[in-house]
Image: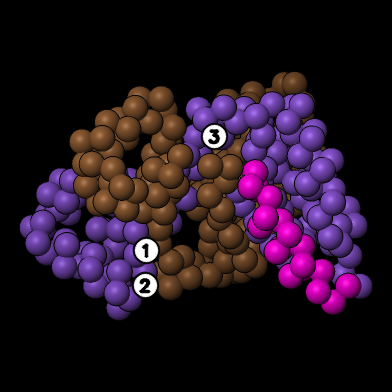
Chain colours: A purple, B brown
Amino acid sequence: MLDDLDRRILRTLQYTPDAAMHEIADRCGLTAAKVTRRLDKLRDAGLYRGQEAVVDWAALGFEVSVSLRITLDKTQARAFDEFHAAARDVPEVTEIQTFLGRVDVRLFVVARDMAHYQMLYRDRILTLPHISDIEALMLVSTLKSDERLPL
Amino acid sequence: MALVKAMQRDATQSAGALGRDLGLSQPATWRRLQKLQAAGVFKGRRVKLDAEKLGFGVTVFLGVKLATKGRVSLDDFERAVIAIPEVQTAEHMLGLYDYRLRVVARDLADFERILRRRIMTLPGAGDVEANVLLSEERLPGPL
């Protein structure tokens, strides 16, 4: 259902998301009206779900980013749901992912500085339900974060 | 902050539309957006696509350790890793492993191919740990 033109439009859009519609159209060799029509179709089909701004937390004063790898106590039937619900209530948590593998859940946490992180870790993270093990990795730098699909 | 939150949700809105939702005039909203932009608050925009519907059924997070400490240049590894199209994000970490990669693949067979041909052959790559993504939730963060 996705033809080469759709693919080309999405590819171009992924590389230059803030380009004006006529620029995208130029790069695809189409008219702006055609691109708009195709994008509307892709949106209706649920393939294209808009665009989000990626926030640079350091620019907002959150200098510390930590990835927390968490193993849950799976003897508790509702461990995943209850952990998830509680983690969602911590404002400094920006991502929650669940996995099949060595790790069950991963949280991405931002903090103003190490003192703030330590406080969050003690008061908000370690108090989350059903944790059996936790490992922290600190983000040094982000090399790539576009999440483009190789269409 | 409400403006940042709104932009996280939908970055394609005009200043006028954003202002209407927040009870601000179009010029006032535009000025605030410019200020946020100038302060570097927005790293850029990300196009949201349904990976699964587009044929990418598998997302795997890899933890990669560098094999030979010291001699291998981080630059070589980093240059090579960001050039792999299936690597969607690459982060340099401090802790259990050195790099964290988000890799997208069509299916598990495709993932195996990427792992063998692209990841294992990276200069300096050592131990690799893989976790298959089951679900993901993005939150607005402390705004």
Q: Is residue B108 left or right of residue A119?
A: left
Residue ID at (65%, 44%): A92
Callout 2: SS: loop
Callout 2: residue from which chain?
A: A
Cα separation between marks 3 and 1 = 24 Å
Q: Is residue A5 magenta?
A: no
Q: Residues within 10 Å of mark 2 (few under 14, many from 20)?
A: some
Query: Residue A68, position in %: x, y?
Result: 75, 46
**Span shown in magenta:** A76-93
Callout 3: residue from which chain?
A: A
Q: Earlier in the sequence, mark 2 or mark 3?
A: 2
Q: Is residue B90 left or right of residue A28?
A: right
Q: Earlier in the sequence, mark 3 or mark 1?
A: 1
Q: Which residue corresponds to mark 2?
A: A46
Query: Which amino acid, mark 3?
Result: Trp
Residue projecting furthest to the front? B23
Q: Residues within 10 Å of mark 1 (few under 14, many from 20)?
A: some
Cα separation between marks 1 and 2 = 6 Å
Do the residues under discs 3 and 1 have CB atoms within 8 angstroms? Answer: no
Are the residues under badges 3 and 1 in a single subunit?
Answer: yes
Q: Which residue corresponds to mark 1?
A: A49
Do the residues under discs 1 and 2 have CB atoms within 8 angstroms? Answer: yes
Query: Residue A10, position in %: x, y?
Result: 30, 58
Which label sits in the foreground, 2 or 3? 3
Query: Residue A5, position in %: x, y?
Result: 21, 64
Q: Quadrant of the N terminus of chain B?
A: top left
Query: Which amino acid, mark 2?
Result: Gly
Callout 1: residue from which chain?
A: A
Answer whether residue B99 is visible to the viewer in this image: no
Residue ID at (16%, 51%): A21
Q: Which residue corresponds to mark 3?
A: A57
Q: Is residue A128 above or below residue B82?
A: below
